[in-house]
Image (tube, helix red, strand yellow):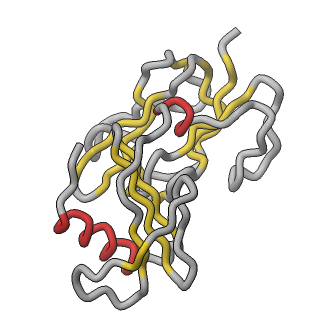
Amino acid sequence: MDIDLEELAAIIELLDKTEFSQFRFEKGDLRIAVSRGDAPLPVDGTATTPSAAGTTTAPASVASPQAAPTAAAGTRAAAAAAPSGAGDELAADEFVVRSPMLGTFYGSPKPGEPPFVQEGQTVTADATLCIIEVMKLMNSVPAAEAGEIRRILVRDGDLVEYDQPLFVLGRAS
């Protein structure tokens, strides 16, 4: 996947309009990391340089595209890890599905339609749990592992950050 300068400038503008200090985007073999402030965001140990594209009021650093890790690794945490922002500790049989990107969370395919999943529902590994909208592109978030939806941590229309916990699932027995 390629990204042009106009799309990159739109990402930086989106970051400028929010209170987020970091933005990471990964899709296929494309990886973009943007940070606000003095210190650039390191990506795989490489230094980044400030972007001179456009008139961004907040200083931003842009990293060059890099190979991305597997999708499953980016969308769920290990069972032993505490879900940052999820509130409670995880049970031994639970795991967290995290947002693979910054964007707007939608729990249903279209407004007014039933949600993809509900608490207590059992899902397969390839089941779509939600959609994250980024720059008018709808990106589905899969469960990555079969299980039962224990908690839904965000609401429809919420702006979610990269790696933010979205769901707590119980592993299928």
Please determine whether, in this image, residue 29 is positioned above or below residue 169.
below
Image x and y of residue 148, in percent? 62, 22
Furthest residue in direction top, as rendered: 173
Image x and y of residue 83, in percent? 71, 46
Taking the spot 59% from the left edge, 39% from the top edge, the residue there is 167
Taking the spot 60% from the left edge, 47% from the top edge, the residue there is 165
Please determine whether, in this image, residue 45 is positioned above or below residue 129.
below
Q: Nearer the viewer, residue 172 or 26?
A: 26
Please determine whether, in this image, residue 56 is positioned above or below residue 42.
below
Taking the spot 69% from the left edge, 24% from the top edge, the residue there is 170
Exactly how many numbered labels are in the figure?
0
Q: In screen coordinates, is 77 left or right of 64?
A: right
Q: Nearer the viewer, residue 159 or 41?
A: 41
Image x and y of residue 41, in percent? 53, 68
Location of the C terminus (image quadrant): top right
Image x and y of residue 13, in percent? 30, 76
Taking the spot 50% from the left edge, 18% from the top edge, the residue there is 125
Q: Nearer the viewer, residue 54 or 119?
A: 54
Location of the N terminus (image quadrant): top left
Q: Nearer the viewer, residue 73 or 95?
A: 73
